[in-house]
Image (cartoon, grey):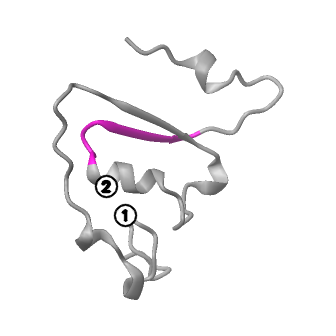
């Protein structure tokens, strides 16, 4: 738990923490998930991207993205191979 009393994984208060209910998801393909989140959503308990990261931690990369007039969109920054 963090100083605010929230879980560091799901960001819910202890009485609502869902981490013990989550299990790793076996994947039959070699995949990687790239999740872009607005910087204001990073510590939001209701953000579903944290569920993906909790179930597939080795295949998921979560990062903040705050688009401005001079910042390219995530699609312009990344190419998947």
- Using the image, determine if residue 58 lies above or below residue 17: above
Instruction: Name the outermost residue toward the bottom.
Output: 15
Q: At 56% across and 64% down in the image, what residue appears?
A: 44
The magenta segment is 56-64
Name the quarter where the N terminus is drawn. Answer: bottom left
Where in the figure is residue 8, as x and y percent of width and height? 39, 67
In the picture, measured across the screen, residue 60 lies left or right of residue 66, that is left
Q: As rendered, which of 52 and 28 lies closer to the eye? A: 28
Q: Secondary structure at mark 2?
A: helix
- Using the image, determine if residue 21 lies above or below residue 29: below
Residue identified by numbered label 2:
54
- Decide whether residue 63 is among the magenta residues: yes
Where in the figure is residue 5, as x and y percent of width and height? 44, 83
Residue identified by numbered label 1:
9
Q: Secondary structure at mark 1?
A: loop
The image quarter containing residue 71 is: top right
Q: Nearer the viewer, mark 1 or mark 2?
A: 2
């Amino acid at each position: 738990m963090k100083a605010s009393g929230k879980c560091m994984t799901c960001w819910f208060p202890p009485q609502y923490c869902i981490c013990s209910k989550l299990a790793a998801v076996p994947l039959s393909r070699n995949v990687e998930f790239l999740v872009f989140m607005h910087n204001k959503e990073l510590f939001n308990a209701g953000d579903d991207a944290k569920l993906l990261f909790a179930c597939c931690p080795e295949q998921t990369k979560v990062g903040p993205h705050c688009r401005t007039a001079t910042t390219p969109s995530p699609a312009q920054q990344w190419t998947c191979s």
